[in-house]
Amino acid sequence: MSDSSRRDFLKTSSVAALGATALGALSSGAYAAGEDTVSIGLVGCGGRGTGACAQALKSPGKVRLVAMGDVFRDQLDGSLRNVERNVEKDDTAEIAVAEETKFTGFDAYKQVIDSGIDVVILATPPGFRPMMLEYAVEKGVNVFMEKPVATDAPGVRSVLESARKAKEKGLKIGVGLQRHHQAPYIETIKRIHAGEVGDVRALRVYWNGGGVWDPRKTREECKTEMEYQLRNWYYYNWLCGDHICEQHIHNLDIGNWVMSKDGNLQFPVKANGMGGRQVRIDPKYGEIFDHHAVEYTYADGTVMMSQCRHIRGCWNSVSEAVHCEDGIVNLGGMGRDSFKINRFDGTVAEVKASGKDPYQQEHDDLFGAIREGKEYSEAEYGAMSTMTAILGRMCTYSGKEISMKDALEKGLGIMPPSLEWDAQLPNAPDANGVYAVPVPGVTKVLG
């Protein structure tokens, strides 16, 4: 790329359109209970952001989408078209996104949050989540943020601090760990906590599958390394956190939920594990592993065995199993309305509970709390389940046993020092486009 075309790209891609007249016409940012319409903005216009936005618009009561932001204009435009198709028959939803409230560039999140909205949906790659949450809380805006909520320990610490400030301000925060809103999970874990199967002895959790989407853009199609990594964000640790964070967090979160009781959050105190990159080795797959296996230990000695894999042609499972004193509780499966308790006396109990799609229910619950002025925060367990996944990655990358305390307090930051299109990135490719991959026994993860 020539110097002139590069300068043009950097200039046009990092500056967002801003119309003062349109912004002045929007509602105030602090939602007052009893008001008719909740105004929302979307930051991160990929598939999950588009889906979350449509679900927010379909939550009970009137909801108006007024602003959208993404680093890429094509993502934003495609997302808006899909949202319009999803909600066109819903007369309680209004889409009022003007040209002046479509924002692009690395500061687009600030412009969306400053657009007079009541709720911001944060659905960018997770590495950006901590700084965006911090800004939303500073500006007094309620938040729905997708999981995971960070990709490194400093990011988790930031989220925990933002959660504290949000509570002081009475702000509501939802996190996209939708199993907490799925009826059979709620009912089954309630029974475990009630002691119906005896004390918990051990847990097994899995996200084993063939993987997700292949890289979407070639290096030749992108103007800078930053654009290339953003377009293919799943394969870069600072953006994704590796698939142990981006996907397996759901199953690890169930383990933490089972171990927590009476409002007392529990998470592992230490972990050890192994992993690597056996099949997905082409440079186009960036730097992340294709398999992880981690042994987590809780304060009472209970062990959670964890597996996640992105390799085709292997045994697949996305599930959780809780080994209790009197039997094994088998959970898992989106869309299912029942789980089974296999007792050691040979009897089988079915826990059946039906409810709304949990992706929709999580928005209904958040927006209900906003309208009614109820306390609502999923940020703490979202942050610590994210940290549970990060701890596992730190163990597999380093080959070491690591305590949660050390991981949270001393874990190295992996975000780039600045966010520009030509910024220096944590892992730049060599002359052949090959990235350095973590090596157990060599890679350092603690400061």
Image (cartoon, rainbow, N blue to C red):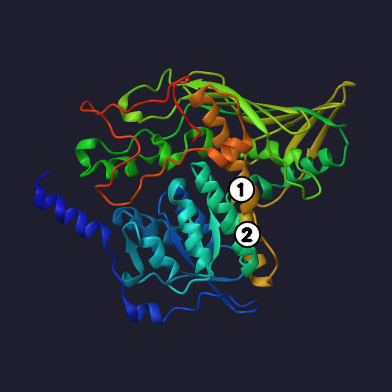
Q: Position of residue 287 (x, y in %)?
A: 38, 29
Q: Position of residue 96 (x, y in %)?
A: 42, 72
Residue farthest to the right? 345
Q: Residues within 10 Å of mark 2 (few under 14, many from 20)?
A: some
Q: Say above or below: 126 vs 61.
A: above
Q: Position of residue 127 (x, y in %)?
A: 44, 46
Q: Say above or below: 210 vs 70.
A: above
Task: Say what amino acid the circle numbered 1 marks.
Answer: Gly
Which element type, helix, strand or loop, lies under badge 2? helix
Q: Residues within 10 Å of mark 1 (few under 14, many from 20)?
A: many
Task: Say what amino acid the circle numbered 2 marks.
Answer: Arg
Q: Position of residue 376 (x, y in %)?
A: 67, 61
Q: Could you tell me if residue 374 is visible in this image?
A: yes
Considering depth in this image, is 281 or 338 the residue closer to the camera? 281
Single out the mark in the foreground, 2 or 1: 2
Considering depth in this image, is 353 or 216 the residue closer to the camera? 216
Q: Is residue 345 left or right of residue 360?
A: right
Q: Could you tell me if residue 53 is visible in this image?
A: no
Considering depth in this image, is 243 or 332 the residue closer to the camera? 243
Q: Which residue is mark 2?
A: 164
Using the rendered view, name the quadrant where residue 83 is placed. bottom left
Q: Which residue is mark 1?
A: 382
Q: Say above or below: 247 vs 378.
A: above
In space, the residues marked 2 and 1 are separated at their CA atoms by 13 Å
Residue at the (34%, 64%) spot, across then down? 103
Sequence-wise first label, 2 or 1: 2
Q: Point out which mark residue 35 bears.
A: none
**Quadrant in which the N terminus is drawn:** top left
Q: Is residue 319 left or right of residue 29?
A: right
Residue at the (33%, 50%) spot, across then down? 418
